[in-house]
Image: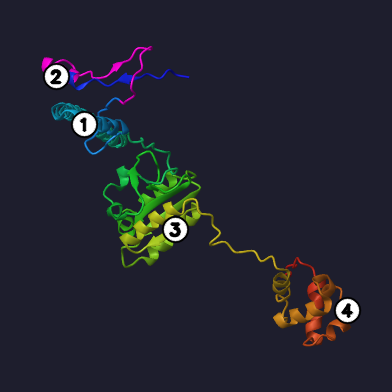
């Protein structure tokens, strides 16, 4: 166990002598191990004016006992304790203020850091280099290639708004709207003044594109004869003839050709009917005097085309709506040859 230390209480005369000599007021001295000493507590300065520690309470009780003996010594002791308490309080409050200032500065610096990060990220975004646009081959990009040496004065170029275009003097057609699609433009007014122009252009560009389109702007009144001639020329050179009646319509045609470059032709292709009932109906209605109702009757009785073809005349005659003439025509359709022999003159 720890050794307990005991202190002696000085007399009033000793306190008064020390006060007059202005020496440090060390009132309590540790007793020697052999002498009996009275037990008391050492006064402890408080951290604030409003707080009183148990040590302070003990010292106040000691001061009470001292006051009964001498009022002068009690007042001096009390003033010394009060000054010590005030100095300790001011020191602690100053240190607390210092901690508060340090804490506020650290919180302010932590608040500034996200702002700096956001500014740096914004600067990186603004200074990022733009990606270079790579020019593609003719027909691969989303632009219409224009033979600018021939079409630079064409007013239709100012009317193309929905699809971008760029000039290219290497192409042989007037407008390249796809990898394998070329458009040759012709105005009937210009064709009437220079009738051999389009023939020379078509002859030079033969077999250049898979789909060759002759886009004609009809801008004259007497257009029947020129169009008949151009239609014949287009058929002979495997061109597709497209007519436009205004400049705006001509520009819309060029835009549409480019937009629908990779669209499959399912929209204009005939849809194959795979239904057996519809196929049987289309087959048997080609026979004279056989209608859709007769086909339903034959199917309900014989169930298939093979059963109808192998049926006898008396079995067909038992079906409602079938007379002798219709039965004869139906049987002839199954037995006559597919190749019709030409009659000798």
Q: Which mark is residue 19?
A: 2
Residue extending furthest toward the front: 69
205 up-or-down from 63: above or below: below
- Residue holding disc 4: 312
Name which of mark 4 and mark 1 comes first in the sequence. 1
Number of residues whose C-alpha sits closer than 10 Å to that of mark 4, classed few (under 14), some (14–19) or many (20 or more): few
For label 2, the SS is helix
Q: Determine crowd level at label 1: few under 14, some 14-19, many 20+ residues with C-alpha closer than 10 A.
A: some
Quote the CA–CA distance across marks 2 and 4.
153 Å
- Say whether disc 1 or disc 2 marks the residue closer to the N-terminus: 2
Q: Is residue 12 left or right of residue 271?
A: left
In this figure, which residue is indicated by the disc labeled 1? 89
The answer to whether residue 291 shows anywhere in this view is no
309 on left or right of 55: right
Between the residue at mark 1 and the residue at mark 2, the CA separation in whole angstroms equals 25 Å
Which x, y percent locates residue 96?
24, 32
The disc, 3 or 2, on the residue closer to the chain's N-terminal end is 2
């Amino acid at each position: 166990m720890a050794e307990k230390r005991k202190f002696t209480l000085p007399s009033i005369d000793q306190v008064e002598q020390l006060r007059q000599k202005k020496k440090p007021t060390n009132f309590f001295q540790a007793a020697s191990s052999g002498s009996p000493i009275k037990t008391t507590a050492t006064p402890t300065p408080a951290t604030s004016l409003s707080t009183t520690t148990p040590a302070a309470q003990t010292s106040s009780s000691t001061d009470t006992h001292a006051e009964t003996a001498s009022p002068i010594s009690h007042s001096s002791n009390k003033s010394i304790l009060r000054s010590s308490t005030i100095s300790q309080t001011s020191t602690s409050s100053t240190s607390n203020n210092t901690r508060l200032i340090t804490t506020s500065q650290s919180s302010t610096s932590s608040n500034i850091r996200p702002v700096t990060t956001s500014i740096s990220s914004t600067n990186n975004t603004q200074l990022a280099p733009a990606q270079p646009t790579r020019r593609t081959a003719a027909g691969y990009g989303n632009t219409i290639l224009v033979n600018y040496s021939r079409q630079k004065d064409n007013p239709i170029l100012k009317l193309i708004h929905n699809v971008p275009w760029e000039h290219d003097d290497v192409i042989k057609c007037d407008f390249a709207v796809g990898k394998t699609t070329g458009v040759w433009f012709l105005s009937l007014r210009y064709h009437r003044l220079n009738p051999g122009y389009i023939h020379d252009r078509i002859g030079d560009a033969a077999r250049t594109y898979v789909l060759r389109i002759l886009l004609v702007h009809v801008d004259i009144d007497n257009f029947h004869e020129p169009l008949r001639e151009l239609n014949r020329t287009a058929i002979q050179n495997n061109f597709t003839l497209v007519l436009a009646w205004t400049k705006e319509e001509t520009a819309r045609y060029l835009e549409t050709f480019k937009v629908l470059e990779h669209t499959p032709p399912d929209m204009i292709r005939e849809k194959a009917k795979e239904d057996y009932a519809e196929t049987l109906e289309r087959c048997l209605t080609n026979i004279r005097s056989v209608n859709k109702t007769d086909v339903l009757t034959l199917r309900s009785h014989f169930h298939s085309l093979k059963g109808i073809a192998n049926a006898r005349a008396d079995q067909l005659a038992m079906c409602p709506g079938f007379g002798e003439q219709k039965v004869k025509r139906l049987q002839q359709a199954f037995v006559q040859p597919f190749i019709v022999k030409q009659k000798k003159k």
